[in-house]
Structure formats: structure tokens, C-alpha cells
């Protein structure tokens, strides 16, 4: 029987990317193999002992791992018909591809579009599930702010561009694809230019979202507005659909 390690299931609105503001049921997976300096969900880095289900009748906890039937039942308690999306997020969902595939097929058949939020590196896992996904929302990680789990900040930088490009090629099998790039004061112009060249070589019309970082942990400030505008202008010379969208749910004060 397929099982999943989940951190939480809750209803809110999409706070990031091109579908910002849309009613969304979030299914958050446990465990991640990256460490982003600006991560706002570090509690998802390790598998969770229990999954919090923040349902209308009151929050409860279910012990992990959860059977797919139990996950579907927990999601149905939120009235799936009123949600435009189910977001499979993390952590990193594609560390559990069998569970992603099973949950996507079960919940997608009940109406909402299935949106996969992923760090965009596990191309083989994506190939196993992409046919069950409606929207692939992938990050493009910048080496100035992100490292693999187990790597020291003293280790040499390890760019992710080639892996992201392979992932993006597979993601295009989905109905819709978008790319999110978190930008911080330490972001380097060359990093973004390299990303743009890779994306343009595949399809320059893919939406690319510049997301100014929300200060958290060691990241104490967002990038200056002037730099964000300069990045936008620079990327628009290569890509057809670049947008600046911050984390709106943080501004509203919801999860």
C-alpha cells in the first residue's frame, strides 16, 4: 500500500506565483534535500512524526506514514468542490513520487486542478508523476542562497542550472508550467542571466516569477526596489513573460 509522510493539510489561498489569490487546499509533504537560507518552512526538512489536519471542525493530528485513502478522506473534509487547486508542496514532494502520483490522481478526479510545488531538481521522479499534474510550479534555485542538505556553507558553490533545465524539459508535458526565482540582496546578476539563457533555450514564453525574498532567519532584508526593477528589465530582454510577485500570504498574515 502506498503511504506518505505529510506535515500538514490545510485550506488557504495561493500566496505565490501566477495563481496568487486562488482558493487552494495545501497538502504539505515532509522532508527536503535542499537548504535555502530564506526557507520559511524549515520544519519540513525532516520527515514528520504526525500530520496536522487543520480541518473546519477543528485541528487534529494523524500519525505518519498516512495511507492514501486516509489522506483523501482528510482532504474531502475540506469540501474539495470549493477549491480551485490542490497544492502538493513541501518539503519536497518528489522525494515521495509514488505518493504524489496516487494523491494527484485521487484528488484530481474530484475536481480541483493539481499544482505541484517543487524545487525543480528531481527530473526522474517528475517523469513518473507529470501526467497526473495540471500545473508544475518549479523553483529555479540560485547557488548564492541554496545548498544541498549535508553540504557546508564553506563548500564551493554548486550551480543547479543544468539540473533545472532537464527538469523543465519534462515539466513541459504538463498542461501548465511556471518558474519561481527567489531573489535576495545577495543575488548576483549573472545568476539570473544564466537562468534566463537556459529558459530561453527551452521556451522563452514560460512565465518566470521574480519573488523578492520575505525576510526570515539569516535573511534580514528584501532586495532594494531599484535592483528588482533592473532585474525585471534585464530578464525581459531574453524572456517573454517575467513578473514580480512577492509572497502575498505573508502580507495578509495567513499560512
Image (cartoon, rainbow, N blue to C red):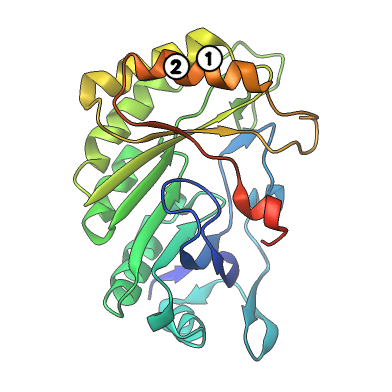
Pinpoint residue 71: horizontal percent, then vertical percent.
48, 78
Q: Secondary structure at mark 1?
A: helix
In the rendered image of this protein, does residue 94 appear above or below residue 155? below
Quarter of the image where one finds residue 162 = top left
Q: Quadrant of the C terminus?
A: bottom right
Q: Nearer the viewer, residue 193 or 228?
A: 228
In the rendered image of this protein, does residue 170 appear above or below residue 83? above
Whether residue 94 is visible: no
Q: Which mark is residue 204?
A: none
Q: Residue at x 68, y 23 (%)?
A: 223
Q: Which residue in the rendered view is the most extreme toward the top?
A: 190
Q: Is residue 239 left or right of residue 157?
A: left
Q: Residue at x 69, y 51 (%)?
A: 251
Q: Which mark is residue 230?
A: 1
- Check disc 2 and report the residue beneath it: 233
In the rendered image of this protein, does residue 43 appear above or below residue 81? above
Q: Residue at x 38, y 82 (%)?
A: 81
Q: Secondary structure at mark 2?
A: helix
Quarter of the image where one finds residue 59 = bottom right
Q: CA distance from mark 2 to mark 1?
A: 5 Å
Amino acid at each position: 500500500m502506498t503511504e506518505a509522510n505529510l506535515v500538514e493539510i490545510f485550506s488557504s489561498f495561493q500566496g505565490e506565483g501566477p495563481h496568487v489569490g486562488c482558493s487552494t487546499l495545501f497538502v504539505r509533504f515532509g522532508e527536503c534535500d535542499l537548504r535555502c537560507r530564506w526557507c520559511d518552512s524549515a520544519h519540513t526538512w525532516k520527515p514528520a512524526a504526525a500530520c496536522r489536519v487543520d480541518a473546519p471542525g477543528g485541528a487534529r493530528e494523524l500519525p505518519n506514514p498516512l495511507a492514501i485513502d486516509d489522506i483523501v478522506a482528510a482532504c474531502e473534509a475540506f469540501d474539495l468542490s470549493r477549491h480551485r487547486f490542490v497544492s502538493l508542496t513541501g518539503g519536497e514532494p518528489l522525494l515521495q513520487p509514488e505518493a504524489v502520483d496516487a494523491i494527484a490522481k485521487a484528488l484530481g478526479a474530484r475536481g480541483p486542478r493539481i499544482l505541484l510545488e517543487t524545487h525543480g531538481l528531481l527530473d526522474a521522479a517528475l517523469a513518473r508523476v507529470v501526467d497526473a499534474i495540471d500545473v508544475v510550479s518549479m523553483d529555479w534555485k540560485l547557488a548564492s542562497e541554496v545548498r544541498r542538505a549535508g553540504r557546508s556553507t564553506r563548500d564551493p558553490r554548486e550551480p543547479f542550472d543544468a539540473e533545472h533545465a532537464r527538469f523543465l524539459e519534462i515539466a513541459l508535458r504538463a498542461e501548465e508550467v511556471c518558474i519561481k526565482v527567489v531573489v535576495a540582496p545577495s543575488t548576483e546578476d549573472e545568476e539570473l542571466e544564466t537562468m534566463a539563457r537556459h529558459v530561453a533555450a527551452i521556451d522563452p514564453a514560460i512565465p518566470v516569477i521574480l519573488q523578492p525574498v520575505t525576510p526570515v532567519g539569516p535573511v534580514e532584508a528584501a532586495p532594494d526596489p531599484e535592483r528588482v526593477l533592473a532585474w525585471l528589465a534585464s530578464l525581459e530582454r531574453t524572456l517573454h513573460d517575467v513578473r514580480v510577485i512577492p509572497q502575498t500570504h505573508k502580507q495578509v498574515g495567513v499560512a
